[in-house]
Every structure is written in C-alpha cells, then in structure tokens.
Amino acid sequence: MAKVIIIGAGLTGLSTAYHLEEKGFFDYKIFEKEQEIGGLCRSVFQDGFTFDFTGHLLHCNDPYFLSFIKKIVGLETFSQVTRNSYIYSNKVYTNYPFQTNLYGLPENIITQCIEGFVTKPQSSKAAKTYHEWVLQNFGAGFGKYFFFPYQKKIFAYDTHKLTCSWTGRFVPNTTLKQIISGALTPKTKNIGYNATFLYPKKGGIVSWVQKLAAQLINPIETNTCVKTVDIKRKIVHFTNGNSEPFEHLISTIPLDTLLSIAKETSTTSLKKAKRNLLCNSILNFNLGINKKNISEKSWIYFPEKQFPFYRIGFPHTFSKNMTPPDCSSIYGEISYLKKNKYEQQTLKKALLQTKKLFNLKNKDIITQKILSISHAYVIYDHWREKNIEKLHKTLNKHSINSIGRYGQWKYSSMQEAVLDGKEMATQILTTKEPSFFIQKSTSQHKIEKEKQA
C-alpha cells in the first residue's frame, strides 16, 4: 500500500511526483491510463512530421519555473520564439491582438471600434458576464468584430453566459493612444503573455515532459485505467481488476471524470455536480505539406462564422525539426460542446478551406493526422463560479485533491501545471502527521529499490 496515489501522468501528476521525491518522499504510486505519459502535452510522429495535441507553447514568467526548466531540461534545448500571429477577418490579415492593430481593416470598422471604445459604458459595478466585461473594457465595436464571435467559436458557448473571471492575463488591455497608433501604422509593439515563448528544438512538446518523467525514481504504471474510486473505504479500483488503498489521493484527471467514477457516500452528491461541469472538445487536424515555409506566421485567428476553425497554426515556425527538410506543417482547431452527426462534414469543410487559403493541392499534402480532444477549454459559467470551491472542499474532506487544469476545472498553462504539482507536494508534506512523512535520500531509495529487485 502506498500512502499517496496519483492518478494521471500528465504534467501536473509528474510535477507532483517529482516534488514529493525532491523532498525525500517515495511512498507514492502514479498511474496513467494511456500507454504514454504526458496527457495533452503529447506529440505524435508521422511520416517525418511532429504534431502536438494542438498548439502547446511554453510561457515562463515565474522565477521558480524558469529555474525548474533550466535544471530539468536546460534552456539550450529550447528555441525562444517571438510571436508572429495574425487575425483574418474581412478578407484581410491584421496583427494580433485585435484591440491594438486595426490597421488594414475597412474604415467603417475602424471607426466603430474607436467610437465604441470612447463611448464604452462606465460602471462602478464589476461585470458579471464576459459580454459585459468586453463592453466595459473595449466597447461595442471591438466586441462585434472580434471578441464576441471569436470567444463564441473557441468556447462553443454563448458569451452572455460566460463569466469573465478567466480573462486575467489572457486578454491584453489597451488605451486610446494604442488603438489610434495601431490604426495608423501596420505594426505595433508585441504585447500579451505569449509575446515570446519557448519551444523544444527537437521532439515536439512531449520531449521536455519526457525528460521530467525520466527524473523520477518511482515507476509510472501506464496502461492502468481507473474504474471507480471508493471514497468511503479509500480504495481505487482499476479496469484491469487491481485495486489500491490510499491515505491521500491526488487526481489530475478531468474533474467531471473523477466525479463520474466516484462511489457515492451519504455526504456527497458528486454525480449530480458532474452534470453541471461544462467543457468543450476540439477536433484537431494536422497536415504535413510538401512545400517549404508556406507561412512565416506563428498562427492565425479566425473569428468569422464562415470558417469552422477558430485558429490555424504552423508548427514549422516553432522549430525547423518539426518537419522533414523543405517541408511545412499546419494544425487547425475546431471546437464543439457536444458531438453531432455533422462532425465529419465540418472537418471536410475545414480542410477544403485550409487548402484554399494556403493554395494547397492534394498532391502537396504528404500526411494528415486527426486528433480528437475530449477536454479542451473549461466553460466558466455561473454554476462553476458558485460551486467549484465547495466541490473541491467536499473532496478534500475525504483526503482527495483534484488538481491541474482539468482537475481544478480551470484555464491554465504548462507553467501553472508544474507549480500546481509543487504546491500539492508541499501541502501534503506540511499538513499531514509526522508519521506520514518518512524522509529518504534519493541514493538511499535507489539502494532499497535495487535490493528489492
């Protein structure tokens, strides 16, 4: 029996395990349902091309995380890339972000955006919805021509029902001076949290996650899927017939999945809560192109309805090793809230439009990979705002922590996944009784493992 069970060997689970071991705690087991570790921080390799599970870029603004990357992977293994992203609307490309780069758009749209910003409603009350937040911060013009249609596409959800607590660092603010400058000149200063980013020089995004996993002393048990979690008896049951008792459970799988497999107790109504947790899904298409550098853009946003995808990106601009020599690659993302019978038709339309946009013929496409991602963007609706904290407290009472992007049911980055794992390890080892924590050095634990073998 291990005192701590970790479900999921994605980035958050691996970080938790790493930071437990770093503090001399090895009395844990980590389980992963897939054959490979990494969760959504994975890459697939096909016909000489590397495709990630949609765009995964590394943003570092935390001192500890930067030191962590240096220690585990080494900054020399990454390229530092300056974002070169655009928006395609009204048949023109404009620089991202939209709110500071109106240059090139039709005059009437520029006028509406500036007028809307100047006359935006002033209110002492905080916005309750994303729709209200956009109107208060940017005005009706910016909302109409970018924020409302784009967010509706990416979340596949009504912007009047979205809250705005997630916006934070993800949506850059602007000033009238910046707006006017960006309307008069074709390029303004790169702003936003992802103005620059790191990307592995080789091996796709999974390469650095694999290096983290390689640091662990304890084994990762892959191909081991959880069937049920008996909360009252504190036992995890797996689909292979095995089971593991625990004193503390750390779950990094999606919260709605955890609630659906949790065995009810008299004090919880977890399955009922599960029905209220909303999250969209993504159909991610990837193309390997037999043309050199078909675009120098990092990615392009598509807010307009006629395009089923909300974003298209170019992995070959992140690293030259993502493709064979003299080739390029494309990824596209289509979001949906519920599967429907038109999914294949939508994909077909998306591929046809992509070929048209970039002047591609069938003979130019060497390979194609379609990836389905069931959990993509968490929907920040009013039910989540009112209940998510209470839901976690209920789990905590049973020595269960649901952490990470989907475990906590939040919108976060790879940096936050690592920091979540670090915080979880610290929390466990500082709040438990002294008898829970048996400290061993890494060398001591290695010797014991070798004796057991």
Image (tube, grey):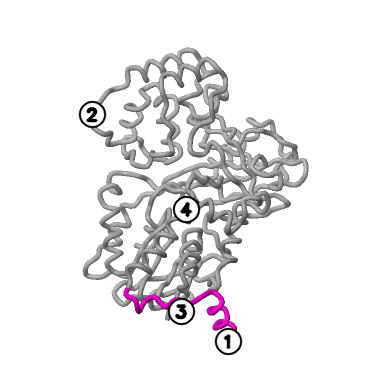
Q: Distance between the residues labelled 2 and 4?
A: 39 Å
Q: Vertical placement of 307 versus 15: above or below?
A: above
Which range of residues does the magenta coloring cover?
A: 433-453
Expressed as whole percent of the image width and height from the top left, the position of residue 281 reads 46, 48
The disc labelled 4 sits on which kind of residue?
A: Ser
Q: How far apart are marks 1 and 3 (CA)?
A: 25 Å
First in sequence, mark 1 or 3: give its number: 3
Residue 395 lies left or right of residue 19; in this view the side is left
Residue 314 lies left or right of residue 396; in this view the side is right
**Residue named by callout 2:** 124
Q: Residue at x 44, y 18 (%)?
A: 177
| Residue 162 seen in render | no
**For residue 334, which numbered disc appears in the image?**
none
Q: Residue furthest bottom?
A: 451
First in sequence, mark 4 or 3: give its number: 3
Q: Vertical placement of 61 versus 215: above or below?
A: above
The disc labelled 2 sits on which kind of residue?
A: Ser
Give whichever of 159, 28 is nearer the camera: 28
Give whichever of 85, 187 is nearer the camera: 187
**For residue 242, which numbered disc appears in the image?**
3
Q: Distance between the residues labelled 4 and 3?
A: 26 Å
Q: Nearer the viewer, mark 2 or mark 4?
A: 2
Q: Residue at x 44, y 24 (%)?
A: 145
First in sequence, mark 2 or 1: give its number: 2
- For the residues labelled 2 and 1, say whether their Cβ atoms are less than 8 Å apart: no
Q: Distance between the residues labelled 2 and 3?
A: 57 Å
